[in-house]
C-alpha cells in the first residue's frame, strides 16, 4: 500500500533529508586514497548522531554499518571495515537518517584520486539517469515512466541497469511501497500522486547486469566484476513537480 504524506509530514522528511545531504556532501572531503571504509562509516555515524538523528541502516535487519560502502564491483550493501581505498577506485556510499519519525535516504558514487575515463563516465551517466527519471516524476504519470527514462538514458550511453534491486517508497518506514525498478516499459505501473515520496536509485554497471551476493550475506557484486555506480535521492511528488529532499 502506498502511503501518501501530508504537508506536515513532508516538513519532517525535509529535515531528515537535509541531514543525509550534509553527510554526503561532507564525504567529498573524507574520501581519498589510504582511507578505510571504517573511517567513512564513523564519519557518517558521528555526523548523523550530532544532528540528534539515527543512522537508518545501523542494525537494520542485522546490518552492522551506519552506511553501505561499496567499492568498484560492489553494487550495493558493502559492509564498512578495514578495506583501504586506492587511487583509481570508485566508491558508492548509501546513507539513511531517521529523525522525528521519518527517514531520508540517498547515495552517491565518488572517485578516489585519479580514475579512468570509463569510470568517470559511469558515475556521470548514473547521476544523469536519475535526473532523466525525475523528469517523469509528475502527478498523473506512471511509475514505470520513471523506470523507462532511467533505463533508456543508461543504455543509450553504453551501460546497463541492475534488475535485481529496486528503489522504494520511504517515510515512517525505510522501505515502503511502491518498489521502483530501474527498467521497464512506459505508461505502466502505479499512478503518481501528490504526497508520494520515493527513493529513486539507479544502480548502473559497465558490463552485465547479473549480480551475486557474497558469503557475508550482504555484499552484492557484479558477476563479471565490472564496475558499478549508484545515485539516489529521496523525492516527493508534488503538484509543483518533483521535490528532491536530499539534494
Image: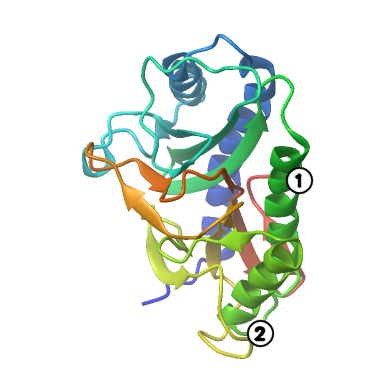
Q: Quadrant of residue 137?
A: bottom right
Q: Nearer the viewer, residue 197 or 155?
A: 155
Q: Residues within 10 Å of mark 2 (few under 14, many from 20)?
A: some
Q: Residue furthest bottom?
A: 187
Mark toward the viewer: 2 or 1: 1
Residue 134 can be seen in this image: no
Across and down, in percent, residue 167 comes to: 49, 61
Q: Residue at x 45, y 58 (%)?
A: 170
Across and down, in percent, residue 212 comes to: 34, 51
Q: Is residue 115 left or right of residue 233?
A: right
Say if 36 sits above or below 238 in the image. above
Q: CA distance from mark 2 to mark 1?
A: 30 Å
Q: Nearer the viewer, residue 6 or 149?
A: 149
Q: Which residue is mark 1?
A: 121
Residue 143 can be seen in this image: yes
Across and down, in percent, residue 222 comes to: 44, 49
Q: Residue at x 78, y 38 (%)?
A: 117
Which quadrant is the C terminus positioned in?
top right
Q: Which residue is mark 2?
A: 141
Say if 87 sits above or below 188 in the image. above
Q: Secondary structure at mark 2?
A: loop
Say if 110 sits above or below 158 in the image. above
Amino acid at each position: 500500500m502506498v502511503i501518501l504524506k501530508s504537508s506536515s509530514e513532508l516538513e519532517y522528511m525535509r529535515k531528515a533529508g537535509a541531514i543525509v545531504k550534509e553527510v554526503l556532501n561532507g564525504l567529498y572531503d573524507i574520501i581519498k586514497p589510504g582511507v578505510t571504509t571504517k573511517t567513512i562509516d564513523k564519519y557518517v555515524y558521528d555526523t548523523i548522531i550530532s544532528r540528534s538523528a539515527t543512522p537508518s541502516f545501523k542494525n537494520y535487519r542485522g546490518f552492522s554499518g551506519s552506511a553501505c560502502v561499496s567499492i568498484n564491483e560492489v553494487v550495493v550493501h558493502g559492509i564498512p571495515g578495514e578495506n583501504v581505498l586506492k587511487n583509481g577506485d570508485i566508491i558508492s556510499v548509501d546513507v539513511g537518517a531517521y529523525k522525528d519519525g521519518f527517514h531520508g535516504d540517498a547515495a552517491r558514487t565518488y572517485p578516489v584520486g585519479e580514475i579512468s575515463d570509463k569510470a568517470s563516465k559511469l558515475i556521470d551517466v548514473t547521476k544523469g539517469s536519475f535526473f532523466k527519471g525525475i523528469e517523469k516524476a509528475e502527478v498523473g504519470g506512471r511509475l514505470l515512466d520513471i523506470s523507462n527514462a532511467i533505463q533508456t538514458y543508461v543504455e543509450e550511453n553504453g551501460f546497463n541497469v541492475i534488475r535485481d534491486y529496486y528503489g522504494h517508497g520511504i517515510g515512517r518506514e525505510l522501505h515502503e511501497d511502491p518498489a521502483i525498478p530501474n527498467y521497464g516499459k512506459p505508461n505502466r505501473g502505479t499512478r503518481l500522486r501528490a504526497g508520494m515520496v520515493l527513493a529513486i536509485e539507479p544502480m548502473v554497471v559497465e558490463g552485465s547486469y547479473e549480480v551475486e551476493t557474497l558469503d557475508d550475506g550482504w555484499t552484492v557484486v557484479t558477476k563479471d566484476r565490472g564496475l558499478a555506480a549508484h545515485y539516489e535521492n529521496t523525492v516527493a511528488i508534488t503538484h509543483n513537480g518533483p521535490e528532491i529532499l536530499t539534494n
